[in-house]
Image: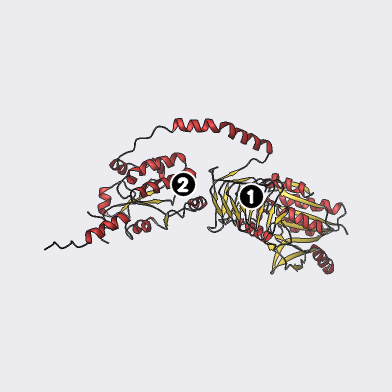
Amino acid sequence: MDIRGLLLVNSGNIREDDLTFLASSPLGVLDVAGKAPLQRMAERLQQYGISSITAVVEDASFPLAKTLAVAAGLNCLVSTPERFWRTAENAFNDMAQSGAELVVLVRLGAYAEVDFEKLVQFHLDRGSRVSQVAHEGSGLEIFCISASRRNDAASLLRSQLSRCRSECPQMEHTGYVNSLGDARDLRQFAVDILTRKTQTCPACEELKPGVWIGHGAIIEKGARVLAPAYIGAYARIRTGAVITRCASVEHHAQVDCGSVVENSSVLPYCYVGAGLDLAHSVAGMRQIANLRRDVSVEVVDPKLIASIAVTSGKRLLTSAADFLTYLPRIAAQGIFSGGKPQQPDLNTALRTTSPALGDTAGYETSACDSEAAQKFPNMVVARRYGHQ
Amino acid sequence: MDINSRPVVVKRMPERVNGRTAREFLRDVQPFLHADRPQLVFDLSQVVQLDAAGVEMLLRCMSEAHKRDGDVKLASLSAQSAVVLELTRTERLFEIYETSTDAARSFSGFLPNAMRQQLLHNKRPAAPLAA
């Protein structure tokens, strides 16, 4: 039986909350313990004998997705967000025309370890046109579609997988599911992989129990990697750094001297500065999603979090430039930071508005008691607790 | 000496605390830091960007204040500043309060060591004169 796979990757299903992370790029193409969910899903389909797989990806995620698709041996189609569903429909029609009998359609989104053999059997037994996978009563975006039923497929794709025009029986899935809706889910996915709650494994060799280290990774003397932890290919852990509690440092990432990465994910090509404490977070592409505080913030200071060049030539040039300009920079700092600005006295300081505050210098004086307010009229807030 | 009449100075930090604004801010608060036993509260509610220079400035302020037996406390941390302070391990060095009022009020809760000793010294009854 000719069964094909159709993987859809777009950013439409990312939750719009405080933990929205890298909203321009779907989480399905970000690496987790060495492989993106897109790759993992493709491999899973291939395990079940579905070797002909087409991935339709939104162009925002194209550079990442194309690399992944090539690595996983997929046929990759790129589309603008507006034409995404039309492209998916065309891909389905092409499969039907080229002789496919069934198409397994998966939108990432959610990563689910579905038994595709069981799904196909369920679909054939019911004799339905479209079958869906459900988890705890709610439908997942995983379908099995009879290729001859193009109108049903078109209806499903045009409604963005929300409606099916014919009866759509649901097969209950009891295995692993991760909705991959925000950074918290991405982090949970890494934890689940490292603690072996999933069938899918970290992408590299397990050197010690619970410690996976990729090809070409450098762990400098004095750095500690405590299980369970994942260090991706060509990642670099510098002296004194500690990687612990299901931390995952993806490929080409760097953790500088003395930093602690605890229960966090460091995305590919991310630099974590020296002496930092990255805990309960996902860091990458100049952003940190802090899971404890439920907030995602942009970090502009390259001393804290920075992006490393993706191409090796650019990385080499950057390192060479840093090396060559190190001494001149130190000399220039010494020369130009010599002059010490004159400090204003206390009375002058109290009567001037801080230029650093700019437009935000709307002082609140509500908390000032009257005596202090008279004495220091330009003070932001002055309180006295003399007789309390 | 009126030990309880020292003011608590609350300064609101700018939206973007980078190298330049940190230097300006430090210049503004230097007079307060150089006062005797300075009591400062920095309000970080409007901070949307805090970089390493900003964190360094905060540490420098705290160090200056401690040299003069004073303290610097932080209040109303924005999400951005809280994340950066946690990342740089500096949040554990400061006392952090939800509001500036709470932070200012906290200064009346305890007295610096030098002041406490002075109080004890003042309260000690005078030794009886030898007959």
Residue on which the image places disc 1: A267
| Quarter of the picture holding the C terminus of chain A | bottom left
Q: Amino acid at mark 1?
A: Leu
Q: Position of residue A45 (x, y in %)?
A: 79, 57
Horizontal relation, residue A325 to residue B1: left or right: right
Q: Amino acid at mark 2?
A: Val
- Between A263 and A346, the residue placed more toward the observer is A263
Q: Residue furthest front?
A: B131
User: Can residue A316 be seen in this snapshot?
Assistant: yes
The quadrant where residue A128 appears:
bottom right
Residue at 73% in and 45% down: A67
Residue on which the image places disc 2: B55
Residue at 80% in and 60% down: A145
User: Can residue A384 be seen in this snapshot?
Assistant: no
In the rendered structure, the residue with mark 2 lies on which chain? B
Horizontal relation, residue A285 to residue A379: left or right: right
Q: Secondary structure at mark 1?
A: loop
| Quarter of the picture holding the N terminus of chain A | bottom right
In the rendered structure, the residue with mark 1 lies on which chain? A
Q: Position of residue A95 (x, y in %)?
A: 83, 53
Q: Position of residue B102 (x, y in %)?
A: 37, 59
Colour scheme: secondary structure
Mark 1 residue crowding within 10 angstroms, few (<14) / some (14–19) / many (20+): many
